[in-house]
Every structure is written in structure tokens, then in C-alpha cells.
Amino acid sequence: MTARRRLLQGILATAAIVVVSPFTQLINFFYRKEEGKAQRQKIANLKDLSPGSYIYFSYPQTGDPKVDNDPFRQFVLIMTSDGQLRVYSRVCVHLWCLPSYIPSRGQLICPCHGSIYRNSDGVAIGGPAAYQPYPTNALPMGRIEVDNNGDIWMVGVEGRIGYGREWRNVKPEDLVKRV
Ligand code: FES
């Protein structure tokens, strides 16, 4: 290999590092787990739910309506038609509108550009969010606990609100604990 060729390869390698490393930082910024927001908060009781029902709520609640109405604190608790409990962030991972839950379809539908999320695991199956790369193609989920009285508590968030969730690593059913 000539000295000139080695020099050229060195320049190209340096250029690649200069170009790629800011994007690595960007990816780290855009996809990191929610931290510092965990709070144990009662959402409802099993008696309040039946298959196909759902409850919108904010988390973590502060008691200040201005703070609690922040879209990034909006969640939905769902009891699926087969009785499974699921909690999802309501912030669409496309451009942050708030999807609504449609029980008859078992889906969350975003009013802005039509992204569709299935209620079993929050993965986008239609609309622009479905074309985003893993793990930015799924709604973050709430970690919940159900106690002996049937009270349902949210205890944390799995994923990064507005960005996604590593849904291949953690099963939705593992986010529901009986305590
Ligand atoms: S913001 Fe939800 S589909 Fe675009």
C-alpha cells in the first residue's frame, strides 16, 4: 500500500468519525429511559374495569392541573377484551399528538396522521409510526401493580415518552405485577 493511499484511508476514517459521532449522541439523547419520574400512584380498582373498558389519567400526578395536563403525563389504562391490563403513554411516537383508545377496534388511533397502535403491546401497526425504526415504533408503557384489594398502582414508565420503547426486550405482561 502506498503512503498516499494510507493517508487517504486515514482521512476517510477521520471524516467518518467526525460525521457519525454527533448522530450517536443524538440517538442517545432521543432514546433513553425515563428516569427520576417514578412514583407509586393509584389509578383505579379492578371493580372499575371490565373487558373493553379504559381510563385516561395523568402520571405522575402533582395536584397542579397545569402540570398534570402536560401531554407527556397522559396515559391510558386499558382492560383488553380478554381481560389483560395495559397502560400506555398517550403521546404518539410520530409527532406527539394524543391518540385515543377505540375499544371496538382494540387500538389506539392518532388523530393527526392516523398512526394505529395495537392494545396488546402498543406497537404501531399502521400510519407513519409503523414505518419508524425499532424501538421508535411503539408506545412507552406504564409499569403497574395490582394489590390484594384489587387496587391498580402505576409505579413507573418503561420506554421514553414521545420516542418509543424496547418492546422486544420486555414483554407487556412482565410490566403487570400482582403484589
Ligand atoms: S402525530 Fe400521531 S400519527 Fe403523526
Image (cartoon, rainbow, N blue to C red):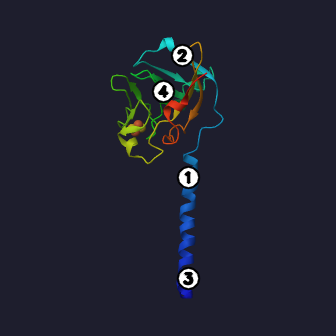
Q: In the rendered structure, are the residues bearing label 4 and label 2 in contact, judged by CB atoms less than 8 Å apart?
A: no
Within 8 Å: ligand 1 and the Cβ of disc 3?
Answer: no
Q: Quadrant of the C terminus?
A: top right
Q: What residue is shown with label 3?
A: 6
Spatial CA span between label 3 and label 1: 31 Å
- Residue 80, horizontal then vertical, whole percent: 41, 23
Q: Residue 158, position in %: x, y?
A: 56, 35
Which numbered disc flags the more N-terminal residue, 1 or 4? 1
> Could you tell me how far apart the alpha carbons at marks 4 and 2 are, in whole angstroms?
13 Å
Q: Residue furthest bottom?
A: 2
Residue 20 image position (x, y, % from top left): 54, 62
Please name the residue that numbered disc 2 is placed on. Answer: 44
Q: Where 164 falls versus 16 (above or below)?
A: above
Label located before the other in sequence (4 or 3): 3
The type of residue carrying mark 1 is: Leu
Q: Nearer the viewer, residue 7 or 170?
A: 170
Which residue has dot 4 on it?
A: 86
Residue 145 vertical placement versus 171 (above, below)? above
Q: Which of the 4 image quarters holds residue 116?
A: top left
